[in-house]
Image (cartoon, rainbow, N blue to C red):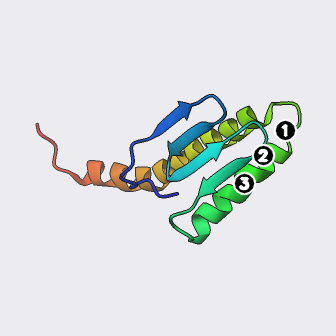
Amino acid sequence: LDHASNAAPCVLPRDRATLLQLGGLTAVVGDDRAHFFDGDASAEPRAALKRIGAAVESDAETPFELAVLEAILSEVSSSFARRRDLYEPVVQRQLRAAPSGD
């Protein structure tokens, strides 16, 4: 997901839908359908949308709108966790190699 998006993250509940800009995803989520706007047709957002769709389909007990929001939040947090896991060893190595301020 594109974490460098210039749009500020937001979740805006409205009367008939929830507007969402979060972690590179832009969507309008209603009671029974969600519309995602894809400014980047690369494989990563498409894969994220497939995971979100699978999560929503597997959760028949939660109302659709809440299931979509939960799946989006899970996807975005997983994306940030993967990024952290990727960068953490590099940062730790640089910190160990840096001269101490003693």
Q: Secondary structure at mark 1?
A: loop
Q: Quadrant of residue 87?
A: bottom left
Q: Where does residue 54 sit, x and y in percent of width and height? A: 80, 51
Q: Is residue 90 left or right of residue 77?
A: left
The residue depicted at 34 percent of the width and 51 percent of the height is 91
Q: Label 2, label 1: how many angstroms apart (C-alpha)?
A: 6 Å
Q: Is residue 97 left or right of residue 102?
A: right
Q: Label 2, label 3: how many angstroms apart (C-alpha)?
A: 6 Å
Tag shown at residue 55: 2
Foreground residue among 99 and 78: 78
The residue identified by callout 1 is 59
Q: Where does residue 53 sit, x and y in percent of width and height? A: 76, 52
Q: Is residue 48 above or below residue 43?
A: above
Q: Secondary structure at mark 2?
A: helix
Q: Quadrant of residue 60?
A: top right
**Do the CB atoms of the residues marked 2 and 3 lie less than 8 Å apart?**
yes
Tag shown at residue 46: none
The residue identified by callout 3 is 51
Q: Where does residue 41 sit, x and y in percent of width and height? A: 57, 70
Q: Is residue 61 above or below residue 82?
A: above
